[in-house]
Image (cartoon, helix red, strand yellow):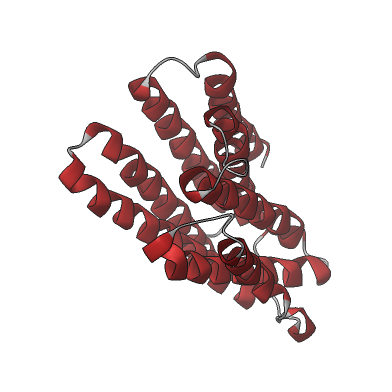
Amino acid sequence: MVAAISVATLSVAVILCKILFLKNAGIKVGFLSKLISSALFCLTGIIAAFSRGRLDIFAALMLIALAAAFAGDILLAAPAFLKDEYKGLFSAAGGAAFLFSHLLYIVVFLCAAPPILYLIPVAAVVPILYGCFIKAKLLSPKKNSVPIVAYGAVLGCLIFSASGLALNGLVLGYLALPAALLFVLSDTALFFYNFGHRPFAVSRTAVNYLILLPYYAAQALFAVAVFFLP
């Protein structure tokens, strides 16, 4: 387990070094640092899975979710090197990979412990919040409004499923819940970066701290959480 935590820490450390020391190093260096960090959180999950002493269906699904996120990272970073005609396709494929990853996390968490029904309203908080941002014109995603609210619903379900684990007293939940909240922070900041109106738009400088760092911290937590699956 110490090895898994060490590799998870290294995953976050790589992206933190990129933010602090290589922020002006260019697209290729940024892509490489993301590639390394993503590979490391996948490796963390593999180490955590085998440290449990068995590889069951839940651990397998978590590893697939981490691998899907890794693929999503590559697909979303690829448009920087592509012609404009291919950028939309790769961005859509990357978003689909993350959606698939989130859904797998939700399935595992809901199966790991009985869901707490009175927490169901928690699942509605994020999509309602995104809807309010759009209605108030803090965000102007235009044709992407419905997909963003729908994606918010998935994030809400992720928080709901992780909250149930935490309230059931599982260590898995103590890791999964902050990871889910970090995901919401990262994705919300990403939406404000892409679609936000000034002065609410996220600046280029803040992207690293509000999008990249929370994202990799969340994936590292999910990867370590594999060890604590029931």
Q: Quadrant of residue 226 in the image?
A: bottom right
Quadrant of the frame with the N terminus: top right
Residue 120 visible within the image:
yes
Q: Is residue 188 above or below residue 6?
A: below
Q: Nearer the viewer, residue 193 or 210?
A: 193
Residue drawn 32% across the image and 50% down it:
91
| Residue 84 shown left or right of residue 167 in the figure | left
Q: Quadrant of residue 26 in the image?
A: top left
Residue drawn 54% across the image and 69% down it:
154
Q: Is residue 116 above or below residue 93?
A: below
Quadrant of the frame with the C terminus: bottom right
Residue 134 picture location, percent across and down = 56, 63
Residue drawn 46% across the image and 15% down it:
24
Residue 63 picture location, percent across and down = 47, 55
Residue drawn 62% across the image and 33% down it:
209
Q: Nearer the viewer, residue 204 or 57?
A: 204
| Residue 139 shown left or right of residue 109 in the figure | left
Residue 68 picture location, percent across and down = 40, 54
Residue 50 visible within the image:
no
